[in-house]
């Protein structure tokens, strides 16, 4: 019967140190994961200092600083920096304003017809240059002749965004309440929108808020203009047009 030979003993400490002087940086880093004693041996400044100076000569100036960095850590840092890929360019939205339709309905109690009911073509909003998703629209021709009483408690606002050719619809806002008075001629409504379905709009940290403002004609309090916008909750800034379109296309495109 053949006897099994006992396993070979691990290499002596002296052999490990001797061999380590002939290893490349990648093998040194891998070998340091074998055990604690190997990590100590493979992390020696005597090994990494020549590598650091030969590959990155300018590191000599960094190593002369006080306190000096570890040659192993400095080599790893510089090596990763030299291999880092540039960040990908930001995605471009597949939708533009010209692909969209906006509908807005405003209801108040004791009125059989809406106070305001209008549809706005996105291309009409493109006629003016916009960096942010915020639009002021004249609706004096579409608004009812009815007026909004001060401190009205039950104003209902429904704002929808649709893709042309009936490719999809997204409810930006459906809210009921008294709104927020802005001066003597404005009534503003806000509602937090759902989080983005895609990572492209994930920049909207802290959440986003849909905003509808009703602007009245002085003492008559008849709606003559509306303000539509999408705001970042953190910082109370309007969302950029590109980011808003990316957000909407995550709901409107299949």
Image (cartoon, helix red, strand yellow):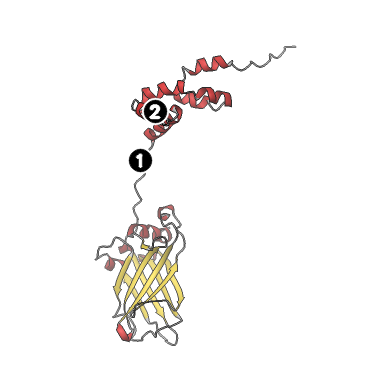
Q: Is residue 43 visible?
A: yes
Q: Which mark is residue 248?
A: none
Q: Which residue is mark 2?
A: 63
Q: Which mark is residue 86?
A: 1
Give the SS element for disc 1.
Answer: loop
Q: Residue at x 37, y 38 (%)?
A: 85
Q: Residue at x 35, y 70 (%)?
A: 228
Against 36, residue 152 (above or below) is: below
Give the SS element for disc 2.
Answer: helix
Is the Cβ of the residue at disc 2 closer than 8 Å to that at disc 1? no
Against 251, residue 148 (above or below) is: below
Q: Residue at x 32, y 86 (%)?
A: 220
> Could you tell me which quadrant the N terminus lies in?
top right
> Could you tell me which quadrant the C terminus lies in?
bottom left
- Across and down, in percent, residue 26 comes to 46, 26
Nearer-the-camera pick, 249 or 23:
23
In which quadrant of the rendered view does residue 53 lie?
A: top left
């Amino acid at each position: 019967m053949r006897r099994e030979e006992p396993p070979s003993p691990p290499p002596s400490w002296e052999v490990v140190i001797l061999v380590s002087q002939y290893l490349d940086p990648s093998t040194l880093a891998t070998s340091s994961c074998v055990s604690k004693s190997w990590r100590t041996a493979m992390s020696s400044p005597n090994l990494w200092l020549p590598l650091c100076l030969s590959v990155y000569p300018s590191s000599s100036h960094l190593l002369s600083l006080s306190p000096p960095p570890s040659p192993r850590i400095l080599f790893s840092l510089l090596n990763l920096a030299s291999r880092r890929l540039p960040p990908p360019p930001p995605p471009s939205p597949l939708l533009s304003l010209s692909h969209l339709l906006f509908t807005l309905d405003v209801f108040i109690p004791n009125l059989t017809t809406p106070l305001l009911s209008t549809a706005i073509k996105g291309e009409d909003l493109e006629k003016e240059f916009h960096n942010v998703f915020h639009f002021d629209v004249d609706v004096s021709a579409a608004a009812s002749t009815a007026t909004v009483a001060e401190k009205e408690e039950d104003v209902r606002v429904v704002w929808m965004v649709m893709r042309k050719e009936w490719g999809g619809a997204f409810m930006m806002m459906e809210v009921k309440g008294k709104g927020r008075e802005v001066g003597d001629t404005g009534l503003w409504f806000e509602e937090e929108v759902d989080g983005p379905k895609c990572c492209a709009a994930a920049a909207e940290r802290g959440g986003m808020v849909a905003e509808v403002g009703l602007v009245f004609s002085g003492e008559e309090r008849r709606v003559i203009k509306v303000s539509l916008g999408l705001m970042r909750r953190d910082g109370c800034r309007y969302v950029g047009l590109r980011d808003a379109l990316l957000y909407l296309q995550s709901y409107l495109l299949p």
